[in-house]
Amino acid sequence: MKEQDEPVLASTNITPLQQIMASSAGALLTSLLVTPLDVVKIRLQAQSKPFTKVMAIPATAIYFTCYDQLRDLLIHRMNNAETACLIAGATARLGSATLISPLELIRTKMQFRPLSYKELTQCIQMSVANEGWLSLWKGWGPTVLRDVPFSAMYWYNYELGKKWLCQRYNKLEPTFTISFTAGAMSGSIAAVVTLPFDVVKTRRQVELGELESLKNSPKRSSSTWKIMYRIISENGFQGLFAGLIPRLIKIAPACAIMISTYEFGKAFFRKLNNERQLKVL
């Protein structure tokens, strides 16, 4: 049937505001349940002892909504639905990663060592004064190298996995369990492949913090590939996969909870909108 040959258009009978509400609910639930595991991953990658509370980043709603809108637009213009999902995932993540890169830098700093908000403000002001506003995008390169391929692989595999599970269990639309399973599997695959760039991003941002605290410290190259070489020379090839288990433990349930909650929210709003239309008619 057509419903099984192509993914259901996410924004059918759904407004962008409703998409934002559904994704925000998923992001909040995911943050409450799995964000503490991100601290463990960062500590293993940075070899740092102390940390402070994790800052919640409200980028998920923008990312998911942009993905759905782009995907639906591309599906109408392209013959290959999976390719449309891959392109939409990469594009949406590129935009959201660029937008929230300064907040990601702040979050990593606060996980690396305890900082009051006053100290954090001073740290940011010092960084801007010394290196300009672009210093707030430190780590953008490896973040993009990590997040864009992750997003492309995640959505491509998620849509394939969701379609396969729907066909296997003879469902016209994905159930909560199908979305949960497909999200966990696709997230795990993408997490393993892109982990080295996550390690580089964390190392670069941590080294920036160390330079700020040591005025006479020699400046080290922040090139992604040179940082990779330095990690390999110091810790071996396995150093690029530091924090693998905590990342998988975090990513798999995070992707599963986020996408299943998001799909559930969209299904709720679709049903609500359909009921309203019937009442009008």
Image (tube, rainbow, N blue to C red):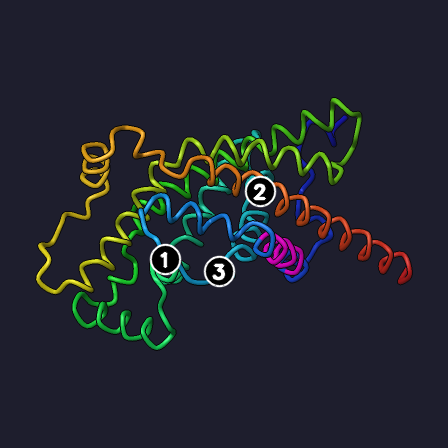
Find numbered disc 1 in the image and state the secondary structure of the residue it sits on.
loop
From the viewer's perspective, tell me whether residue 4 is left or right of residue 246: right
Where, by quadrant of the figure, is residue 145 drawn?
Answer: top left
Q: Kindly report the distance in space between the C-alpha atoms of the residues bearing marks 2 and 1.
A: 27 Å
Label 3: how many Cα within 10 Å (few below 14, some 14–19, many 20+) = some
| x and y, in percent, of residue 160 in the image | 61, 28
Find numbered disc 2 in the image and state the secondary structure of the residue it sits on.
helix
Q: What kind of residue is marked 1?
A: Pro
The label nearer to you, 3 versus 1, is 1
2 or 1: tag closer to the N-terminus:
1
| x and y, in percent, of residue 221 in the image | 14, 47
Mark sitting on residue 78: none
Mark 1 sits on what residue?
50
**Residue 25 shown in magenta:** yes
| x and y, in percent, of residue 146 in the image | 38, 41
Mark 3 sits on what residue?
57
Asked if 86 appears above or below 119 in the picture, the reply is above
Mark 2 sits on what residue?
255
Q: Kindly report the distance in space between the C-alpha atoms of the residues bearing marks 3 and 1.
A: 21 Å
| Magenta-drawn segment | 21-30
Query: Residue 99, can we see it?
Result: no
Q: Kindly report the distance in space between the C-alpha atoms of the residues bearing marks 3 and 2.
A: 15 Å
From the viewer's perspective, tell me whether residue 258 is left or right of residue 233: right
For the point 65% across and 58% down, the residue is 25
Q: What kind of residue is marked 2?
A: Cys
For the point 38% across and 55% down, the residue is 98
3 or 1: tag closer to the N-terminus:
1
